[in-house]
Amino acid sequence: MFRLAFANAAETFERVRAPLAERGIDAEAVSASHGSYSLSDPPFSVEAFDAGYVFPGRLMEGGVLDAWLDVPWLNDREDVLTSRNKAGVLATLERAGVPVPETVMLSNPADTADLEDAYAAIPGTVVVKPNSTTRGIGVAKAADLDSFLGIADYLDLVHDYRATGDRSYLVQEYLPDARDYRVMVLDGEVVGTVERRLPDAARETGRWKHNVHRGADAVAADPSPAVLDLAERAAAALDIRFLGVDVLETDERVVVNETNARPTIDDEEKYDEGFYDRFAAAVKSL
């Protein structure tokens, strides 16, 4: 039996365990976080594994896990770092000719003139987001300059008084009527797509984020060929084997908004036929 170390979120692990077992892969949860660990006495048999799914999200603890296991990962540390840097991803995609939202990066300390210029560069309401968070954490919307400057003040305080290696954030155009897709690309080809929809009741209360962890629903989707093509082009430009690509589509435009090299795997019926066969083959090829 092929042994796969799984350091991803619990919900993904529980979904993939049985389908992978049917294909000769024993997935086992491993961790070096949320607890106390002896570096000379790992909490599991490190010789038991043939490969790892994706590098842990906590990169420092992940380095310990990587040293213990000494196995190839489907997505390694470099892939996770690449995808986590939203500004780096957008710059790479734009250079590769992949359309992205109009975006300005700010790096603290940024003076008021820099902030005003960044806001003026993008007409209308803007989205302000940290450069390296997930699940919609810290993402805000500003419809006027004073609101935007207030958000920037809070970010400046966080960067001043909290030890962090990332002092950058993004100002991005807001596409209010866009359809929001998470497209999964494996070895260069789309293997499934979900559309993230905010319930009407949530919209009526003023909610606008489409993150599943913020209350949106992920439903099976059959998007336009333009959406699928853009996702495959994004994965190719970033050279990441298994990638969740967030694509926004309006009546006029299709753009890649973000990517995720540690994507949540949803229910099997939301993916293309043969998804787990291809997923298992990719894991066994490591």
Image (cartoon, helix red, strand yellow):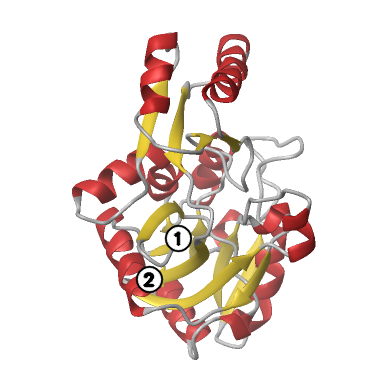
Q: Which mark is residue 248?
A: 1
Structural distance between the alpha carbons of marks 2 and 1: 8 Å
Q: Residue at coordinates 48% horizontally, 89% vertically from top-left?
A: 274
**Looking at the picture, which amino acid does disc 2 mark?**
Val
In this rendering, the answer to whether 112 lies above or below 61 is above
- The answer to whether any part of residue 138 appears in the image is yes
Camera-side residue: 28 or 226?
A: 226
Q: Is tag 2's residue or tag 1's residue first in the polypeptide sequence?
A: 2
Q: Residue at coordinates 46% horizontally, 38% vertically from top-left?
A: 124
Label 2 close to label 1 by CB (< 8 Å) = no
- The answer to whether any part of residue 85 appears in the image is no
**Quarter placement of the N terminus:** bottom right
Q: Position of residue 228 (x, y in %)?
A: 37, 74
In this rendering, the answer to whether 73 lies above or below 140 is below
Q: Residue at coordinates 46% horizontally, 69% vertically from top-left?
A: 183
Instruction: For mark 1, give the secondary structure.
Output: strand
Residue, far bottom? 273
Drawn side of residue 138 relative to residue 93, left or right: right
**Looking at the picture, which amino acid does disc 1 mark?**
Leu
Residue at image mark 2: 227
In this rendering, the answer to whether 83 lies above or below 53 is above
Marker count (numbered): 2
